[in-house]
Image (cartoon, rainbow, N blue to C red):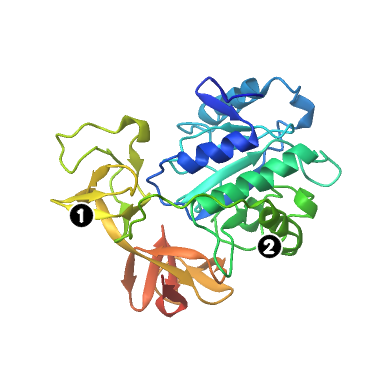
Amino acid sequence: MEMAITKFGFTLFELEEFRAWITALSVPRTVKTIQQHHTWSPSYQQFTGTNHFAIQKGMKEYHVGENGWSDIGQHFTIFPDGTIMTGRSLNRSPACIRGNNSGAICIENLGNFDQGKDEMSVEQQGSVTGVTAALLKRFSLITADELGIIYHHWFELSTGARTNGAGMTKSCPGTNFFGGNDLESFRQNFLPAVQRSAEPLPSPKNPSTIMGWAIVTWDTITIRRGPKATFQIAKEHGPLEVGTILRVYQEKNDWIKISNSKDIWVYSRFTKKVTKGKINRDETNVRTGPGTDFVSIGSTSKGATVFVREEQKKWSLVGADMWVRSSLITAD
């Protein structure tokens, strides 16, 4: 394929095209994790080599018609031939892992990668690791102690708590996804493959210091091209949903600038300032309220990025009904 193709509102890329596209793309929403999934169904049996758009359209129709979602759940689908297709806008959270969609990008890898099912093609393997590496670079998610990658299998279905595979979970992205879906297989197989796929991306031409972060507190808010309601709406970015984390580059007259490269602003009274931090201890308990008398709904791992929305009694709210001891969070 010589150039990206667009149909039904989706765009199909080769890997090198995707890398160039994601490097140039402006995304106001703060991204902190890359989710890995397999579609399970459709699988390799449904893929003919030419029906990429029909499959993606079918998944969107199912997600909207059967699940009641507003759009297709994932941001990207990676096909057996290694091509990559866009889905939901990157300015919106996905609908992929309960309780863990804010700040996430969702990748659905087409196929059933449980043991004894589809054998992932070499082309798809290269794009899965290449796309993941490009996203990690683009959104600065690579640090000394972690990469911001998560598997659906690591989260309990009913609560969204991280259990690393214990309890009631899906096998997604597959019990044979790069050798397995547990943490050991991830660290031994997938993580090194992603690191080998990493390519340096150009530094921004006009680097700017982030002043802080804010969370959207209104149902949806409009992005405008200047710090007043009279400025034109930036329609290409779409409205931002409640719970979206934003970077703050400038403040002016109750408006905040949310991009370094674009002159785009939102009304600050529909947002709330939050503090970015990292969990500083493994197996940190997450509870439904600010205290040990509240129910534990799982744990989070050392190095995980969190955004503190409020503090009570030396506990920090880091998500909807998700509280962690403040002493276990190191400010970033």
The picture places residue 231, in percent across and down from the top left corner, at: 18, 34
Q: Does residue 125 appear in the picture of this structure?
A: yes
What residue is disc 1 on?
A: 251
Q: Quadrant of the C terminus?
A: bottom left
Q: Residue at x 56, y 66 (%)?
A: 298
The quadrant in which residue 168 appears is bottom right
| Element carrying mark 1 | strand
| Above or below for 192 versus 98 | below
* Front label number (2 vs 1): 1
Q: Does residue 74 appear in the picture of this structure?
A: no
Indicate the amino acid at tag 2.
Answer: Ala
The picture places residue 211, in percent across and down from the top left corner, at: 29, 61
| Above or below for 68 versus 183 | above
Looking at marks 2 and 1 on the same chain, the residue that comes earlier in the sequence is marked by 2
Q: Residue at x 55, y 48 (%)?
A: 135
Q: Residue at x 63, y 51 (%)?
A: 152
Label 2 – label 1 distance at C-alpha: 44 Å
What residue is disc 2 on?
A: 166
| Circles 2 and 1: CB atoms closer than 8 Å | no
Relative to 318, 217 lies left or right: left
Q: Quadrant of the N terminus?
A: top right
Indicate the amino acid at tag 1.
Answer: Glu
Taking depth in this image into account, of 328 and 286 the one nearest to the observer is: 328
| Element carrying mark 2 | loop
The quadrant in which residue 40 appears is top right
Relative to 266, 292 lies left or right: right
Q: Which mark is residue 70?
A: none
Q: Residue at x 58, y 37 (%)?
A: 18
